[in-house]
Image (spheres, helix red, strand yellow):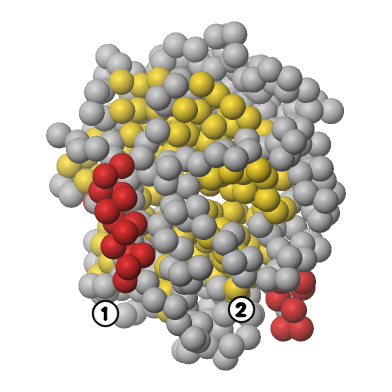
Amino acid sequence: MKRRNRRVPFSSPLIPWVILMVAISVSAAPANRQPSPSLLSLGDDGRQGNAFSVRPEISADGQVVAFISMASNLVTDARPGLNIYVRDVGLETTRLAYRDAGAIGAVDTDPTISGNGKVVALASTVGIGFHTSARQIVLVEGDERDVVSRNDDGDVSTGQSVTPSLSFNGRRVAFVAVAENLAPGCSERFSAIYLRDRATGTTRCLSVGKDGQPADGASLQPVISADGMFVAFRSAATNLVAGDTNGVDDVFVYSVGEATLRRVSVGADGAQAEGESSDPSISGDGTNIAFLSRAGNLDRRAMNGEYAVFVRDLSNSTTRLASVSSKGKAAETFSGQPRISADGRYVAFLSPSSVLAGKRSNGKRQIYRHDLSTGDTILVSRGHDALPGNGNSFQPAISANGQMMAFRSAASNLVKEDTNLTDDVFHITLPVSDR
């Protein structure tokens, strides 16, 4: 099978993340009853958005959420069309993430937020020192703006730059670009993965062939660990590692410290996946990586040809199926959009599976959270009536300890008096276990 090539002053990053993990782990107590979600895509006055809200991204402590919305009534100074917002869960405030983007014709996409909740990154056609049809990666930190899709000389990318991913403190940024001037080693023909270090002002190419030659296929979907030392991504390239002969997209991880690449989408025995793999999500220390795969040889329970969620533990070279019920039964249909908590314990994902929903199943895509320690899988998109959401839910985001989540849903029964008849962003606090 042929691959489909697609064009398309800092402190240590690890210490504050570890401190945060300890703090929220201590504060998290098991609960006897699972709560229902709350509506998050609101104005300061509690007004529901008058148009759809999507693509939530959550901070490590779960208290800050960035999202995209077409709503014009969340703030008073929103420009017409799509805007990126930041919602403070505790303060119940909503603000524009990027006020400079108010120019007519500006396009802002791909929001993400750093683990400490202080830095928002996005792809935009309006930034500092440029106004072009090619999107660039813009970082917003307080009143400061920084365009990071640049080379070591400070020149902005000659092509599109999209899908940023931030380390915990926002020092390092991984992103996708199709460019000829960012860093040596990346192909000018295909989208490639880059890493920008804001402290040193350097940019390096990560998706480089094993022999130092440019990758022979497109690379996409970068995600960086909280400590900034590992970047996982999807690639159609065949020359990133030795023995890549399966003819489909794989998931890889780059070690920043060692400047090495390894393939993630393999079985416990190291066998390469027999089906396409994609959508990586990485734990805070880079040890555990969740991903999707259609391969039937990674776990005997997986349905061959259907996307399932797997977790690769790099510390012990194991691959586990995560899209399973609390009894360990695999979803009988597709699962998608996996997100792993920074502590590597919880995996969130979507699925319309009746195996996961049980007798309550209504055929809609629901959000689930699977506990890799206990094996428990719980329904997250659960209505105030204790029934699964009556509309499709997508795009889960999960806090560092897995206790808080945000997600998008078209369901109208998640909260009482959801009257805007469109997709909203929801937030939920879930029980966690000490086991």
Q: Residue at x 52, y 57 (%)?
A: 345
Pick the residue in front: 15 or 181: 15
In percent of width and height, residue 162 lies at 46, 36
- Is 30 situated left or right of 277 in this image? left
Q: Position of residue 261 (x, y in %)?
A: 55, 24
Q: First in sequence: mark 2 or mark 1?
A: 1
Q: Nearer the viewer, residue 298 or 134?
A: 298
Q: Which residue is labeled 2 in the image? A: 389
Q: Is residue 153 above or below residue 235?
A: above
Res 257 seen here: yes
Q: Residue at x 53, y 54 (%)?
A: 339
Local packing at callout 2 (Cα closer than 10 Å; few below 14, some 14-19, many 20+) is many
Q: Amino acid at mark 1?
A: Asp
Left or right of 292 in this view: 123: left
Q: Position of residue 413 (x, y in %)?
A: 56, 84
| Residue identified by numbered label 1 | 45
Question: What type is the residue that disc 2 sits on?
Answer: Gly
Q: Quadrant of the N terminus?
A: top right
Secondary element under disc 1, as helix, strand or loop, is loop
Let me know if residue 81 appears in the view: no
In the displayed structure, 269 sits above or below 325; it is above
Neighbour tally class for label 1: few under 14, some 14-19, many 20 plus, Cα within 10 Å: few
User: Which element carries disc 2, helix, strand or loop?
Assistant: loop
Name the residue located 54 percent from the left edge and 45 percent from the top edge: 288
| Residue occupying the point 59% across, 8% down | 211
Distance in Å between CA atoms under marks 2 and 1: 26 Å
Image coords of residue 208 (percent x, y): 54, 17
The disc label shown at residue 16, or none: none
